[in-house]
Image (cartoon, rainbow, N blue to C red):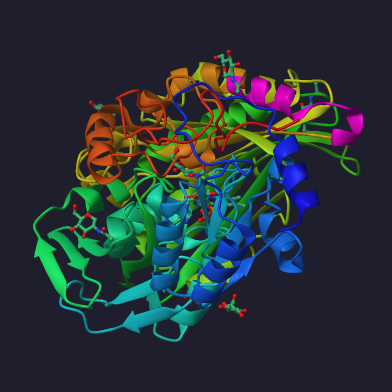
Amino acid sequence: MGWLTRALVTACILVIVHGVVPRHCHVDEPCFPSNNELYQFSRTLDGGVLFPSDQLYSKIIVLHNVVYTKFPIAVAVALTTEDVQKSVLFARKHNLLVSVMSSGHDYNARSTAHESLMIYLGSMNKTKVTLSSTRNPAGEMTCESGNTWLKVYSELTQYGRVIIGGSAHTVAMGGYTLGGGHSPMSRMFGMAVDNLLEVEMVTANGSIIRADEQGTTWVNDDGTTRRTTDADIFWALRGGGGGTFGIVTKFTYKLHYAAKGLVTFICIYPILLANKTNIGYDVLGHIGNLIPGLPKEWGGYMGVAYNHDTTADTYGTISLFLNHYGTWDSPSRSYVDQFANYKPELQTYCQMKNVSTFIDYEVTARDPPIYSTALLNVLMQNDSFTKDWVKFMIDKVLYDHPIQESSISWTGTLLGGKMQDVGIHDTSVHPGWRSSYMSLSGGVGWNPGNGISWDKAVDEAKALGDEQIKFGYGMYPNESGPNVTNWHDNFWGSNYKRLLEIKRKWDPDRFFYCSQCVGSDDDQPAHVPTHGHIGIGLGGLGPLG
Ligand SMILES: Cc1cc2nc3c(=O)[nH]c(=O)nc-3n(C[C@H](O)[C@H](O)[C@H](O)COP(=O)(O)OP(=O)(O)OC[C@H]3O[C@@H](n4cnc5c(N)ncnc54)[C@H](O)[C@@H]3O)c2cc1C
Ligand SMILES: *[C@@H]1O[C@H](CO)[C@@H](O)[C@H](O)[C@H]1NC(C)=O
Ligand SMILES: *[C@@H]1O[C@H](CO)[C@@H](O)[C@H](O)[C@H]1NC(C)=O
Ligand SMILES: *[C@@H]1O[C@H](CO)[C@@H](O)[C@H](O)[C@H]1NC(C)=O
Ligand SMILES: *[C@@H]1O[C@H](CO)[C@@H](O)[C@H](O)[C@H]1NC(C)=O
Ligand SMILES: *[C@@H]1O[C@H](CO)[C@@H](O)[C@H](O)[C@H]1NC(C)=O
Ligand SMILES: *[C@@H]1O[C@H](CO)[C@@H](O)[C@H](O)[C@H]1NC(C)=O
Ligand SMILES: *[C@@H]1O[C@H](CO)[C@@H](O)[C@H](O)[C@H]1NC(C)=O
């Protein structure tokens, strides 16, 4: 790495986070590895190490949320679990801040940090399908963390099986699964964490473990193993969040038999008609009333968005984008007739279709290549879909834009069904998930051309989020803003206490740090490194000047 880059990186350190951020070695300190040490390290990895002068470096560090680009000192490209292990040991030796990235989809940039050694898992994309498994009748699939969901779905289709993954094609296994993971089929088969059978992980002290519900297997350097009955870490990884307990290299999930056929249902209404009649209150009220009763075979999304249809001269849309697990003649299919038959003359579009596989539904989803959106989230409960809530949604989306030049839109992922069969403490996700009917995520988007700052959008999203949380119980950390009020409670509720104990046990030095992650503000005295500037630290949070 050249001097220029180092100077640039150092000059960027404008944010001083309070003392809770663990201290790490900075580029201008003696503890920092020399160029030669970095070079020697890069030679030990199968995947090599990228420095700022490498073209690929720039490609990896630019996040999908473009607001948050940061500059790690180097990117360790892991191809194997041993590469990850070596990177952790190197970072520990030099007391470097580590950031962990699978896809770089984290809305709040927790997968990158200035001056960090980024451990990049995006090239670890091997998979293995095992159809005859003693653990699960329909078999299992092991995916390295860098796989994206569309790749996994495509590979599975030939086996007549489905897996619980995200709707976004480019989201990866890592952050998605560790944060909980909802899917268009979660009402049928639960969350990603409910379908997780086993993980392989590199611990904070550089050991390789395999963990499942029964215990933990430690892999010794010579390849021999040692089994314990400690199942804490597996519990913590089922919802406790990425980037904080260890680096998961492989995830093994349950598979499910594919349905004989599926039905999709897409229905769209305008909110404000050309003659200025607002039908949004009625339409959303009607949808809200029907959601808690939806059969588990139906899953998918509800959207409430601001837009102007210039042809029809209408404003706003309320849309349903649903899929039914099972053929047309299943009794559960006709439930959505109650949507289809509601004010049909006012619908912009409404159609039910037969499709043969999940991927036929899934390919129609479109990932935004980049976004600059500040998020807010709430887990909606059976009593959340009130008149007040309807008014809140329609008024915000249409009339009270949080900031003049911005807009807000919501995506609600339908929850419930099988997700409610899992106990509130069986996994570490917020208990609110187990009684929830919808994970409602709002995004404040704005036009940077109008000079509105990202900070402003974040503040507005935060204010809206504080208002919105009163309708439900709990928030999805992976679809929330960067600075959430009462985040311990809102993200994990009564599971936080045990998560923190596990964090203290598995990472007593707080080697893994990300903002608003379990233990990120832990003030219990931890191991204090002998080097490092007091009071200066860099977290995964915050726009840098
Ligand atoms: C377009 C889009 C669509 C989405 N759709 C869905 C959806 O359908 N369902 C849903 O539940 N969520 C969805 N999300 C949210 C998604 O769950 C999160 O963005 C998730 O964190 C992405 O994980 P990642 O590994 O791809 O991202 P990254 O940014 O690479 O990682 C996210 C976080 O996890 C950590 N991390 C990543 N990999 C590992 C690992 N192997 N071990 C330890 N820590 C790790 C990172 O350090 C970071 O803190 C969507 C997000 C986007 C942007
Ligand atoms: C899988 O990762 C390798 C690098 O390890 C890469 O060359 C390849 O394009 C990836 N495959 C997909 C489908 O992303
Ligand atoms: C990490 O800690 C565990 C348990 O304390 C120990 O068994 C293991 O050897 C340690 N690993 C390394 C690489 O030091
Ligand atoms: C507005 O248009 C709708 C749909 O055409 C109609 O039902 C409604 O009566 C109209 N309202 C007014 C005030 O004209
Ligand atoms: C879907 O297929 C069933 C037969 O399996 C048929 O009765 C039904 O009309 C089809 N629906 C559509 C919209 O094509
Ligand atoms: C709503 O859920 C609560 C607790 O989760 C339950 O006690 C109550 O009976 C439910 N109400 C309805 C109308 O289903
Ligand atoms: C999901 O939330 C957890 C906990 O805050 C965090 O570890 C992980 O990085 C998050 N990902 C996103 C997209 O916020
Ligand atoms: C987070 O929100 C609080 C108000 O709840 C505010 O005082 C603080 O400045 C915010 N921090 C950041 C980094 O935006």
Whether 242 is drawn above or below 12: the answer is below
Tell me residue 200's x, y (percent): 31, 65
State the quadrant of the N terminus.
bottom right
Location of ligand 8 given as a quarter of the image: top right
Location of residue 319 by image quarter? top right
Q: Give the range drawn in magenta.
A: 448-462
Whether 79 is drawn above or below 268: the answer is below
Seen at 25% across and 72% down, the residue is 221
In magenta segment, residue 397: no
- Pick whichever, 519 or 204, lies toward us: 204
- Along the horizontal axis of the image, is 194 left or right of 154? left
The number of numbered badges drawn on the structure is 0
Judge whether residue 278 can be spotted in this image. Answer: no
Seen at 52% across and 41% down, the residue is 25
In magenta segment, residue 457: yes
Whether 390 is drawn above or below 215: the answer is above
Seen at 70% across and 62% down, the residue is 57
- Pick whichever, 436 or 98, lies toward us: 98
Tell me residue 213's x, y (percent): 17, 58
Predominant secondary structure, magenta span? helix
Tell me residue 477's x, y (percent): 46, 37
Whether 92 is drawn above or below 149: the answer is above
- Along the horizontal axis of the image, is 482 left or right of 13? left
Tell me residue 468's x, y (percent): 52, 21
Instruction: Pick out the residue farthest to the front.
Output: 30
State the quadrant of the C terminus.
top right
Seen at 52% across and 67% down, the residue is 41
Location of residue 404 by image quarter? top right
Judge whether residue 342 can be spotted in this image. Answer: yes
